[in-house]
Image: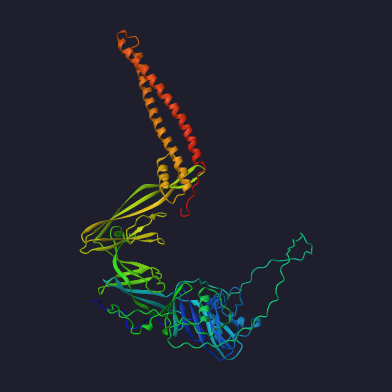
Amino acid sequence: MRAKMVWAAGMGAVVVFGAGCGRQAIATTDALPVSRVVVYRNGVAYFERAGRVDDGEVRFKMKRTEVGDFLATLAVMERGGSSVRSAAFPLPDDPSDDGKGNGDAPNADDARAGGSAGPPLTEEQKRDRRNGLETVLLSLDGKVHDLQVGYVAESPVWRPSYRLVVHPEGDADLQAWGIVQNLSGEDWKNVKLSLIAGAPLAFQADLGTPVIPPRPTVTDEGEVIAAVPRAETSLAQEPAASPAAAPPPPPAEVEDEEAPGAASSGRDADKKSERRAGAGMAPSASLRSNAQPVPAPKMEYAPAAPRPAVSPPRNLRSLAAVAVEGGSTRYDLPLPVTIPDRSATMVMLLSRSVSGEALFLFAPDGGVPDSTSHPFRVARFTNGTSGVLERGPIAVFEGGAFLGQGMVDPLPAGATATVPFALERAIAVDLDRKFDEVGGRLAKIENSELTVERDRVTQTKYRIRNGGDQQAKILVKHPRIGGARLFSPPAGTEDNVGTGTALVPASIPAHATAELVVDERATDRREADWFSPIADVAIKAYLADRQSDHDVVARLTSAWVTRGEIVSKTAERDKLQQASSALSSSTEETRRNLRAIEKNKTAEPLRQKLTARLADAAAKLDDYSRKIVELDSKLSELTVQFKEAVRDIKVTPSPAG
């Protein structure tokens, strides 16, 4: 029976960092409270403020360093009434001002308050400038407004945290939490929170700093044209139709408010402004929101398990809705969230049953010396959600006990993660490699040149010893050879092309030893001599292939008969040449012996015997020479015949080759 484990008493946990007294907010305005926050994984967040304004302007007070990002990503959604006319902000008068207030003299604010610098600064403005704050003024063209203002500002990345409870039946319970940190300088009260699993392009903009590029100096030296300019000529085109009058823009409509606590991915205008803001692009100064409501994305709820190992939330609708937008996974919290300034909140994103198990993984790691001979204990599970699980820590449990912690790499939907969390010393692994070269295939014939292919074979043999009392299921993380392919891999092998590795499974009984062989083959293409053994193997394989070109097969078959004669007669000639060389050496020795007994009158019988042997050897040498000459003549004829036979044969490589 599965042990019941409760992760948390509620849906969120808040951690306070500090008092934060006197800390300046990134951007604030009393007129529009924060209503929505979208946190990314690249150090920025999209903030949306909404409310009713009964004034002709809205003042934003923000850090001087944030003015550029604010202006580059500002999006104003007018939901009724009048629209925004402009967004104004002050510029430093002193060119030496570095934008941080460091270039101001003690009385610089007073100096800017007089003369041609404009109206005097108030005490509040002076205090703000000393604290590195600026005011951005949104000027409106009326008195009644229903505004939504969105912008991007720096923010800590949100971080995921996972819990996995593995069961013997081959399944597991997975929970994912998101940790959000608020360092914006103000409280987020009852905001709609979304977390984006991705890091779109977002750069720092310096639009608040004046830039005056240098210009060239032009002097008046008369109007003499030093060179005749070249004219451009355009031929007559078909007469263009007179442009039709553009239809007037549709009147602005007011969008219905969303139901409280509803799981929605937001309005069309919200999505557009957020995507542009997340990409570091500035939306237009004023956007009209669409009055048509957008259907909420499908909620992903964890199914009720008959034997729950993890205590699921009572209200499954409190889990985040998972949606994929523009290739990025987003988690939308359906209920409002309050995160005080200088605090962190952990919210539950998903809780569901997935396919998973606990097993062993042999993957040598330089940071763990003993891993070169012992496997890791690992948790293996499949991402059964529709979105990406970001990189984060995972705690693994089994049988009501904590097994260890690991790190999950970014895991796409449907992918499987294998997370090491401990080292198993009851299992030992060693390996051995051997290399060979096998096979022969016809690759190309062109211009009477033959190209063949052979396989360079690398066989890695893993010997696995299980010293435990139970059968062990193990995965061997085999480093793949670049450019090689797996040849007849064991059943269940996972060839991970992106990581350059292969996971090869094996099952070892208790107190037993097993061998696992991984065969990798890489194709080696080279030119070959027509009369070499590898050429004979390659051509015969081509002739035996039913998919080969029939005309080429017929011509090669005829040529190969000629080649067979050449090979046979070449072997016969080599045999005769060897016999002739041996007989010549024997004859030379006989001559030396005759010279040695030339003046010995008692050796006449031996002299006659040696003389007869010389005569017989000379006759045989003449016969060998005659036959060799005849074979050379025949070989020359056959060689020309063979060259003519293969001269016009052309075999091109296949597209896959």
**Coloration mode:** rainbow
Residue 339, visible in the rendered structure: no
Residue 94 quadrant = bottom right
Image label count:
0
Residue 535 quadrant = top left
* Nearest to the observer: residue 625 or residue 429: 625
Residue 335: % across, % down:
41, 85
Residue 543 against residue 416 in the figure, above or below: above
In screen coordinates, is 480 left or right of 307?
right
Residue 155: % across, % down:
46, 76
* Nearest to the observer: residue 525 or residue 270: 525
* Nearest to the observer: residue 611 or residue 463: 611
Q: Residue furthest top?
A: 601
Residue 113 against residue 604 in the figure, above or below: below
Q: Quadrant of the N terminus?
A: bottom left
Residue 457: % across, % down:
37, 50
Residue 214: % across, % down:
65, 68
* Nearest to the observer: residue 627 or residue 546: 546
In screen coordinates, is 606 left or right of 197?
left
Residue 205 against residue 570 in the figure, above or below: below
Residue 250, visible in the rendered structure: yes
In screen coordinates, is 576 left or right of 122?
left
Which residue does the image show at 45% across and 88% down from the upper left?
259
